[in-house]
Image (cartoon, rainbow, N blue to C red):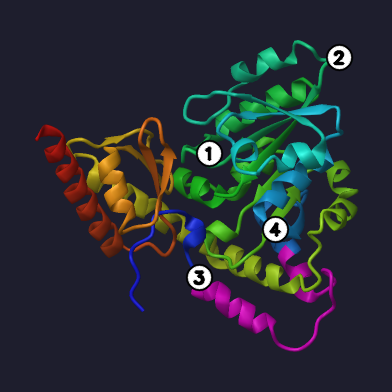
């Protein structure tokens, strides 16, 4: 069945065939429930190989749960979580962090969605003051919601700042694979080796059917997480089906191949539309997201034919996302449509 190219989200993509085959292979015979099966043990061991021996992974269903429950293990209700204003936990979790944690989110406008120690320093002025929420966690997204990437040195600087001030560093790694592929480094380089204390490791956006992982790099944070996960309604009875997918993703570098394909298609799309009069790229294209400003009429016409989101309605900025399943032909067709509709909108404005 033919379908129009989709640039709304990498969540729109289907399941990678290798992952689907792993699910089918896992669906043979019975297996112990709640993570006591061989596939879950193997996946946890594989996480340790990839992220370091100090990695303690726990599988959950959803990205929102991965973020919120990881933060729950790191905080108490009088604490605060420091994040960028554009962070997913601030914008797209429907208030779940604040409702579930009881913590306050303290957010700051940032350049390109990336925090720096300088951004965070003003929030430490009330440490020890019982009248104020106490900063406890710095949460960063890698890649950011704007598609930008923290370099290894930037993560290390944030980790050093956090630890020097008695804080912890959490990473929302929904698109960690895209960031690592963009930088040409290993997953460990961006997480345990860089000083990250807890990681929400994304799978769904990189070829899985469902499933994320919460990974702690400190034993004290992992100690109570089995109970936090159960109370958070994220303990999967048939956990082997999440574990099997992560084994497929981490074995043989599938995570990198999928992420590299998505990144390459975003770069190709940016190159194809960059020179169109009346269109402006608003962010550097570092991973699998393209942000562009164009005429409202062109946006409306394009959305009649293709799925994508308007990121900023006031400034007429759209977000175009690519995935492991995006093809060059789809990019070419979409770029041609963008060129046609932007030109039509420009001609109409001049008439």
Q: CA distance from mark 3 to mark 1?
A: 23 Å
First in sequence: mark 3 vs mark 2:
3
In screen coordinates, is 231 left or right of 200?
A: right
Question: Which quadrant would residue 39 be assigned to in this image?
Answer: bottom right
Residue 200 shown in magenta: no
On residue 144, which mark appears?
1
Residue at mark 4: 47
Q: Where is 276 relative to 268, above or below?
A: above
Q: Where is 287 relative to 133, above or below?
A: below
Q: CA distance from mark 2 to mark 1?
A: 32 Å
Q: Residue 94 versus residue 210: which sits nearer the camera?
A: 94
Quadrant in which the C terminus is drawn:
top left
Quadrant in which the N terminus is drawn:
bottom left
Residue 50 image position (x, y, % from top left): 65, 55
Farthest residue toward the front?
A: 351
Q: Secondary structure at mark 4?
A: helix
Residue at mark 2: 131
Q: CA distance from mark 1 to mark 4?
A: 23 Å
- Badge 2: few (under 14), some or many (20 or more) residues near its Cα, within 10 Å? few
On residue 16, which mark appears?
3
Question: Which quadrant would residue 311 be assigned to in this image?
Answer: top left
Residues shaded magenta:
16-43
């Amino acid at each position: 069945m033919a379908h129009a190219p989709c640039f709304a989200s990498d969540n729109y993509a289907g399941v990678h065939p290798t992952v689907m085959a792993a699910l089918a292979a896992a669906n043979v015979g019975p297996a112990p429930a709640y993570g006591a099966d061989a596939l879950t043990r193997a996946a946890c061991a594989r996480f340790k190989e990839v992220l370091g021996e100090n990695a303690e992974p726990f599988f959950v269903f959803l990205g929102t749960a991965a973020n919120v429950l990881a933060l729950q293990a790191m905080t108490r209700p009088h604490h605060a979580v420091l994040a960028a204003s554009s962070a997913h936990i601030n914008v797209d979790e429907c208030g779940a962090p604040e409702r579930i944690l009881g913590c306050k989110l303290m957010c700051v406008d940032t350049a390109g969605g990336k925090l720096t120690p300088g951004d965070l320093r003003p929030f430490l002025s009330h440490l020890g003051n019982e009248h104020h929420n106490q900063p406890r966690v710095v949460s960063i997204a890698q890649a950011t919601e704007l598609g930008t990437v923290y370099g290894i040195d930037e993560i290390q600087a944030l980790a050093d700042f956090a630890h020097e001030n008695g804080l912890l560093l959490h990473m929302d790694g929904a698109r960690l694979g895209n960031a690592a592929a963009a930088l040409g480094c290993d997953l460990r380089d961006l997480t345990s080796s860089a000083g990250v204390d807890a990681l929400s490791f994304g799978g769904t956006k990189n070829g899985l059917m469902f499933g994320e992982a919460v990974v702690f790099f400190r034993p004290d944070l992992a100690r109570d997480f089995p109970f936090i996960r159960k109370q958070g309604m994220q303990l999967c009875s048939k956990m082997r089906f999440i574990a099997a997918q992560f084994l497929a993703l981490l074995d043989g570098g599938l995570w990198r191949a999928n992420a590299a394909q998505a990144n390459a298609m975003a770069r190709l799309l940016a190159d194809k539309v960059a020179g169109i009069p009346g269109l402006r790229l608003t962010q550097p294209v570092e991973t699998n997201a393209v942000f562009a400003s164009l005429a409202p009429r062109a946006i409306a016409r394009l959305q009649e034919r293709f799925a994508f989101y308007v990121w900023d309605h006031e400034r007429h900025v759209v977000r175009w996302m690519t995935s492991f399943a995006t093809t060059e032909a789809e990019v070419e067709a979409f770029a041609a449509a963008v060129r046609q509709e932007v030109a039509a909108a420009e001609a109409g404005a001049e008439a």
